Image: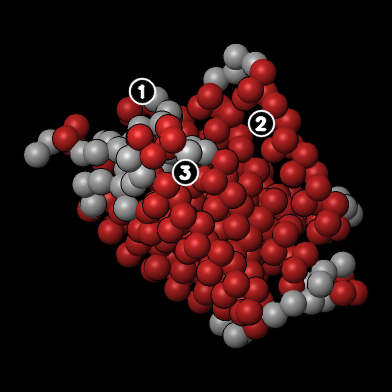
C-alpha cells in the first residue's frame, strides 16, 4: 500500500484537543523535573531517557495506519517531557541562558517548518496521511516543546512575571488567537501552530506553579504526585474523546 493509502493520523482539533494538550504540556514540566531533579538523574541523562521513549512512541505512531488516540497522546507527552529536560540542559548545563536558548530553538523551529513546506508543499495539520509529513509533524512538535519550555522559563524568571504571571500572559495570548480564529480570515494553519507552540510555555509555567517552592512563587506540590494526577486526567479526557468519536451520528443529533 502506498503512502496515500494511510488514514488520517491526527485527531480533530476541538476544545477537548486543546484541553488535553495543555494538561500534557503541564505533565511534561512536572514529569521532566521529577526525573531530572526529584530523582536526580540530571538533565542530560533524563533527556536521553525521554528521547528514547519518544523514539519508541513515534515509531509506533508512524507504523500505525490509522489514528490511535493513546499512541498519539503518548507521543505528545514524550515530546513535552523530552523538551523540558533538553531545554533545561541547554539553559543550565550548557549555560546558554533562556534568551539564547529560546532564539536558537526558534531558529530551529523555523528551519523545520521551512523544510517541511519545501518538501511537501504544505505545513497544514488537518490531515496527516503521508509518512514524510508525519515525521516533519513530530519533529516540529518536539522542537516547539523544547522552545516552549525555554520561553516559559524566560518569562517567569528573567522577565520577572513569575509562574502565575507567565501563565496569565500565555493564557491571554491563546485567548487572542482563539478570538482571531473565530473573527478573522487568518490562515488556520498559522493560527494552529501559534496556539500549539504557546500551549507549551503555558504548561511549563503551570507545572512550575504547582511544584516550585513557595519561596519561588509555587505551591510546592510533589512533582511525582502531580505528574500522576495529570496523567490520570489525560487518560480520562482521551477516553471521553474516543467514546464521543465513536457515537453514531443519530445519537449526536438527538443529544
Kindly identify which residue carries mark 1.
121
Kindly identify which residue carries mark 3.
140
Q: Residue at left 66%, top 55%?
A: 203
Q: Residue at left 19%, top 32%?
A: 4
Give coordinates of residue 221: x percent, y percent: 74, 77
Please say if the residues under marks 3 and 2 sit with CB atoms less than 8 Å apart: no
Q: Say if residue 17 shows up in the picture.
A: yes
Sequence order check, earlier mark of 1 and 2? 1
Neighbor class of circle 1 (other Cα within 10 Å; few <14, some 14-19, many 20+) is few
Which type of secondary structure does the marked residue at label 3 adopt? helix
The alpha-carbon separation of the residues under discs 3 and 2 comes to 21 Å
Sequence order check, earlier mark of 3 and 2? 3
Neighbor class of circle 3 (other Cα within 10 Å; few <14, some 14-19, many 20+) is many
Q: Quadrant of residue 230?
A: bottom right
Please say if the residues under marks 1 and 2 sit with CB atoms less than 8 Å apart: no
The alpha-carbon separation of the residues under discs 3 and 1 comes to 15 Å
Neighbor class of circle 2 (other Cα within 10 Å; few <14, some 14-19, many 20+) is some
Q: Quadrant of residue 107?
A: top right
Q: Look at the image and tell me in which quarter the N terminus lies.
A: top left
Q: Quadrant of residue 176?
A: top right
Amino acid at each position: 500500500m502506498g503512502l496515500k493509502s494511510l488514514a488520517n493520523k491526527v485527531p480533530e482539533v476541538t476544545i477537548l484537543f486543546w484541553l488535553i494538550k495543555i494538561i500534557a504540556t503541564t505533565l511534561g514540566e512536572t514529569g521532566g523535573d521529577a526525573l531530572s531533579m526529584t530523582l536526580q538523574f540530571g538533565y542530560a541523562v533524563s533527556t536521553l531517557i525521554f528521547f528514547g521513549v519518544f523514539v519508541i512512541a513515534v515509531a509506533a505512531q508512524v507504523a500505525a495506519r490509522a489514528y490511535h488516540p493513546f499512541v498519539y497522546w503518548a507521543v505528545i507527552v514524550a515530546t513535552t517531557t523530552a523538551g523540558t529536560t533538553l531545554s533545561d540542559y541547554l539553559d543550565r548545563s550548557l549555560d546558554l541562558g533562556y534568551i539564547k536558548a529560546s532564539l536558537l530553538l526558534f531558529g530551529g523551529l523555523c528551519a523545520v517548518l521551512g523544510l517541511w513546506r519545501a518538501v511537501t508543499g504544505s505545513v497544514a495539520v488537518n490531515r496527516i496521511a503521508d509518512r514524510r509529513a508525519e515525521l516533519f509533524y513530530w519533529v516540529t512538535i518536539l522542537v516547539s516543546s523544547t522552545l516552549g519550555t525555554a520561553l516559559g522559563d524566560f518569562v517567569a524568571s528573567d522577565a520577572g512575571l513569575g509562574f502565575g504571571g507567565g501563565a496569565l500572559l500565555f493564557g491571554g495570548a491563546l485567548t487572542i488567537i482563539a478570538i482571531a480564529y473565530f473573527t478573522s480570515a487568518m490562515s488556520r494553519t498559522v493560527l494552529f501552530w501559534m496556539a500549539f507552540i504557546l500551549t507549551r510555555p503555558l504548561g511549563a509555567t503551570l507545572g512550575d506553579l504547582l511544584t516550585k517552592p513557595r519561596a519561588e512563587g509555587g505551591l510546592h506540590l510533589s512533582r511525582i504526585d502531580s505528574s500522576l494526577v495529570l496523567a490520570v486526567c489525560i487518560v480520562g479526557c482521551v477516553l471521553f474523546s474516543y467514546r464521543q468519536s465513536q457515537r453514531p451520528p443519530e445519537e449526536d443529533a438527538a443529544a
